[in-house]
Image (cartoon, rainbow, N blue to C red):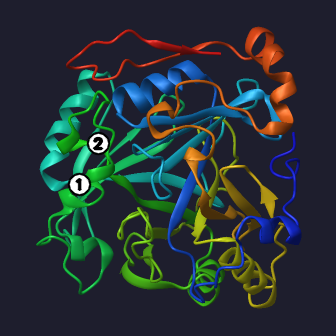
């Protein structure tokens, strides 16, 4: 099965047409753009991530390398970079196993006062929860649980904004609940005050530490900001993370590298993260990062590939995790209005001739949770 090379490449001519001549930032990545994992069942995935966790389904499309399978996107109301968790629906592949060379945990940011709400909500929905626990000298509390396919998730509540972003700048009097509150999906089933705000971080399990750390700090411009040597956990923050357009500062800026030399190597499959994507502000920034990955890190990134909602460059970091550099534009609203996001099947232009066959013969229909589930109980929407 092809994993990332089949979609159309972006030529230099295309980049000029799409306004890619804006000046590169000169800095590193802006933080996490999206994380893509693998699920066995589309409906069960939607029920959990939208119905239970309250993320908005912002795009229901197909895998651009395999149009016979769904690619599901979840995020905040607008599907901003830094909030996007996506899934390839591959029911027939093997079950993944946790280990080194993988993103082993995906963590979302929540306000500190929301921990009790989430423990109760998850348990009422039949989810086994561990915690609350603390990390980094009580700088954050978190709970851990698994999704229906076995992928490890965390909801993390920093004690303050500064303890999360490691910045001297104050954000609304250290009110963590203010981070990205404007963009939460207020029509979803979760009370807006408790809604998942964005990615907090991702944890990467590695057999070693130095080579991945060097890539993060020297080439991608992360900064080591905390460490727990007892756990072998090293925290890095994207120092180029900042407010850009509608994407606020302090979302998705953190990655933890967990050194686990005694753990066997993981196998990517159902319940695993397939890849993690890092934000580039535009095409020029992406090309600058690609050049540095080649010259400084001596790695072999792909050409730029058009994924319609962003442009992508892929490469494997020294520990084996598949990394992507993805542009913020064009974004999720390139083919749907904000109020229409995730309400029907969208296809890239090159697959439109297959729409009837895909909808009627190939893709199983899926039902979306009703909006305002706890208040209005609207009828379910159906796609495909």
Q: From this view, report whether residue 237 is shown above or below residue 108.
A: below
Label ID, residue 289: none
Mark 2: give few (<14), some (14-19) or many (20+) Cα within 10 Å: few
**Whole-percent x and y of residue 36?**
61, 47
Residue at left offset 31%, top offset 75%: 165
Identify which residue, 37 or 21, lies in the foreground.
21
Q: Would residue 329 appear left or right of 74 to someone viewing this image?
A: right
The quarter of the picture where the C terminus appears is: top right
User: Can I make out residue 98 in this image?
Assistant: no
Pointer 1 residue: 133
Mark 1: give few (<14), some (14-19) or many (20+) Cα within 10 Å: few
Identify which residue, 284 or 304, lies in the foreground.
284
Q: From this view, report whether residue 158 is shown above or below residue 266.
A: below
Residue at left offset 87%, top offset 25%: 353
Pointer 2 residue: 130
Q: Residue 66: name its quadrant.
A: top right
Q: Would residue 300 appear left or right of 348 to someone viewing this image?
A: right
Q: Assign a secondary structure to mark 2.
A: strand
**Whole-percent x and y of residue 294?**
81, 83
Q: Are marks 2 and 1 in contact (CB under 8 Å)?
A: yes
**Whole-percent x and y of residue 175?**
14, 64
Q: Would residue 59 appear left or right of 347 to someone viewing this image?
A: left
Q: Would residue 335 appear left or right of 83 to someone viewing this image?
A: right
**Whole-percent x and y of residue 270?**
65, 35
Q: From this view, report whether residue 253 is shown above or below residue 61.
A: below
User: Can I make out residue 250 in this image?
Assistant: yes
């Amino acid at each position: 099965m092809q994993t990332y090379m089949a979609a159309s490449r972006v030529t230099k001519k295309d980049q000029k047409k799409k306004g890619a001549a804006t000046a590169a930032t000169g800095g590193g990545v802006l933080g996490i753009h999206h994380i893509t994992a693998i699920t066995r069942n589309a409906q069960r995935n939607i029920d959990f991530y939208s119905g239970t966790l309250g993320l908005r389904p912002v795009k229901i499309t197909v895998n651009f390398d395999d149009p016979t399978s769904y690619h599901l996107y979840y995020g905040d109301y607008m599907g901003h970079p830094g909030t996007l968790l996506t899934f390839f629906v591959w029911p027939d592949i093997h079950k993944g196993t946790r280990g080194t060379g993988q993103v082993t945990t995906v963590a979302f940011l929540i306000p500190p006062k929301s921990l009790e709400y989430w423990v109760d909500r998850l348990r009422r929905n039949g989810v086994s929860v561990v915690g609350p626990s603390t990390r980094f000298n009580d700088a954050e509390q978190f709970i851990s649980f698994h999704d229906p396919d076995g992928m490890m998730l965390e909801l993390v509540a920093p004690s303050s904004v500064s303890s999360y972003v490691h910045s001297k700048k104050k954000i609304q009097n250290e009110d963590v609940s203010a981070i990205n509150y404007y963009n939460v999906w207020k029509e979803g089933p979760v009370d807006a005050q408790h809604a998942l705000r964005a990615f907090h971080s991702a944890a990467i399990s590695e057999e070693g530490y130095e080579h991945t750390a060097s890539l993060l700090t020297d080439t991608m411009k992360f900064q080591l900001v905390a460490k727990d040597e007892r756990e072998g956990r090293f925290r890095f923050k994207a120092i180029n993370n900042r407010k850009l357009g509608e994407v606020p500062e302090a979302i998705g800026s953190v990655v933890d590298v967990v050194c686990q030399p005694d753990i066997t190597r993981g196998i990517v499959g159902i319940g695993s993260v397939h890849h993690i994507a890092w934000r580039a502000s535009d095409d020029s920034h992406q090309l600058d990062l690609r050049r540095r990955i080649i010259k400084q890190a001596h790695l072999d990134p792909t050409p730029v590939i058009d994924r319609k909602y962003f442009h992508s460059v892929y490469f494997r970091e020294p520990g084996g995790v598949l990394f992507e550099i993805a542009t913020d534009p064009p974004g999720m609203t390139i083919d749907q209005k904000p109020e229409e996001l995730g309400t029907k099947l969208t296809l890239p232009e090159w697959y439109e001739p297959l729409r009837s066959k895909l909808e009627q013969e190939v893709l199983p229909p899926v039902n979306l949770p009703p909006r305002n589930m706890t208040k209005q109980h609207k009828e379910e929407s159906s796609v495909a």
